[in-house]
């Protein structure tokens, strides 16, 4: 699988499942900042977990075991983790931008 495709799928799955987990943890509680904090904590962690699972699948089950492939695989791991963290940051900026903009312009 392509490393960019892995990162995008990981971000989508991480944020969808992270929001479901945060919603289930906040179910029945009054809405407060702790619920949004749970979402902010769960989503990036699950995103990185999904990316590493996809990388392990493509590295161990889809490529032959040679030293060159091993080197390339670890290089793709670090590039992919960086790309996944960048996509997480972009997703959070898109998601949180309206709140920050309304805070500064409504004053």
Image (cartoon, helix red, strand yellow):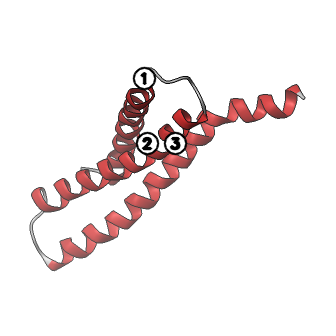
Query: For numbered disc 3, what is the local secondary structure?
Result: helix
Residue annotated with mark 1: 27
- The span from disc 2 to disc 3 (Cα, nearest Å) is 6 Å
- Quadrant of residue 83 within the rendered picture: bottom left
| Closest to the observer, 28 or 65 | 28
- The span from disc 1 to disc 3 (Cα, nearest Å) is 16 Å
Vertical placement of residue 11 versus 74, above or below: above
Q: Quadrant of the C terminus?
A: top right
Q: Position of residue 99 (x, y in %)?
A: 71, 31
The mark closer to the camera, 1 or 3, is 1
The mark closer to the camera, 2 or 1, is 1
Q: If you read the primary sequence from the N terminus, does the residue marked by circle 1 or circle 3 appear first? A: 1
Q: If you read the primary sequence from the N terminus, does the residue marked by circle 2 or circle 1 appear first? A: 1
- Numbered tag placed on residue 43 in the rendering: 2
Instruction: Please report the residue visible at 40 percent of the width from the left and 37 percent of the height from the top.
Output: 18
Vertical placement of residue 75 versus 54, above or below: below
Residue annotated with mark 3: 40
């Amino acid at each position: 699988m392509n490393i960019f495709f892995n990162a995008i799928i990981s971000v989508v799955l991480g944020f969808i499942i992270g929001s479901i987990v945060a919603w289930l943890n906040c179910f029945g509680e009054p809405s407060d900042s702790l619920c949004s904090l749970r979402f902010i904590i769960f989503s990036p962690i699950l995103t990185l977990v999904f990316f590493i699972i996809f990388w392990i699948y493509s590295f161990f089950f889809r490529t032959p075991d040679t030293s060159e492939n091993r080197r390339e695989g670890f290089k793709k791991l670090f590039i992919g983790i960086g790309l996944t963290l960048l996509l997480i940051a972009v997703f959070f900026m898109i998601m949180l931008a309206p709140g920050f903009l309304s805070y500064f312009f409504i004053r």
